[in-house]
Amino acid sequence: MASWRVGFPDAVDEVTVRLVAGVVLVVGLVALLTGWWPLYAVLATDFVLRALFGPGRSPIAQFVLRMVRPRVNAAPRPTAGPPKRFAATIGAVMTVAATLLGGVAAATGSTAAATAVFAIGSIMVVFPALEAFAALCVGCVIFAQLIRLGIVPERICLECADITDRLAARLREDVAAA
């Protein structure tokens, strides 16, 4: 199955990405509202797997691809993969930090650590909400700024832009065959 390929694809379906963001939003909201910081470990594991190995190794992405996306009547909309991978990396860093700080807060009663977890948790609600509801990927915006600043080589997105049309056609074929 193509979704189990190792590595992050050059193009991904924006509809699926937004649905994944919706699941992340729900988990993040539950963690934030209940203060149950171990949920950040669940998100951290998923983000790390997605950032390192692509959506084929992400339990949340696989759940969305298998259970949710087939029920959504929307044509695939290919979008560049590298900025989404960067966004997943930001999610990984943030949720790993929330997990570690949550453990510190629980073990020591540190209000500073608890406040930091709340701040990170708030970001981990706002960012996926923007992606899910407004198709605004904050990580992608940051990625574009890094390209403009010359920190990320421009060729990374030129290469994904070049292949996007071919992958869009393949994605449409895959969906039609399913």
Image (cartoon, grey):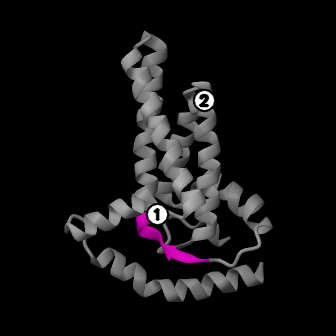
Percent position (x, y) of residue 151? 21, 64
Q: From this viewpoint, is residue 100 visible?
A: no
Q: Is residue 22 visible?
A: yes
Look at mark 2 in the image and give the residue it sits on: 33
- Secondary structure found at label 2: helix
Residue at x 20%, y 66% (from the top left corner): 149
Q: In this view, does 87 lie to the left or right of 168?
A: left
Q: Does the magenta stretch include residue 23?
A: no
Inspect the image, locate mark 1, and give the three-letter code of the amino acid beneath it. Answer: Lys
- Left or right, 165 with respect to 140, comes to right
Where in the figure is residue 50, as x and y percent of width and height? 51, 55
Task: Please tell me whether mark 1 or mark 2 is closer to you in this view.
Answer: 2
Outermost residue, right side:
71
Which residue is label 1 attached to? 84
Q: Residue at x 33, y 74 (%)?
A: 156
Say whether residue 134 is left or right of residue 147: right
Instruction: Decide which of 119, 165 is in the foreground and name it.
Output: 119
- Residue found farthest to the top: 108
First in sequence: mark 1 vs mark 2:
2
**Which quarter of the picture shows residue 3?**
bottom right
- In the image, residue 40 sits, relative to residue 53, either above or below, namely above
x 54%, y 51%: residue: 128
**Image quadrant containing the N terminus:** bottom right
User: Label 2 is placed on what type of residue?
Assistant: Leu
Asked if labels 2 and 1 touch by Cβ distance under 8 angstroms, the answer is no
Looking at the rendering, the stretch of residues picked out in magenta corresponds to 77-83
Q: Distance between the residues labelled 1 and 2?
A: 27 Å
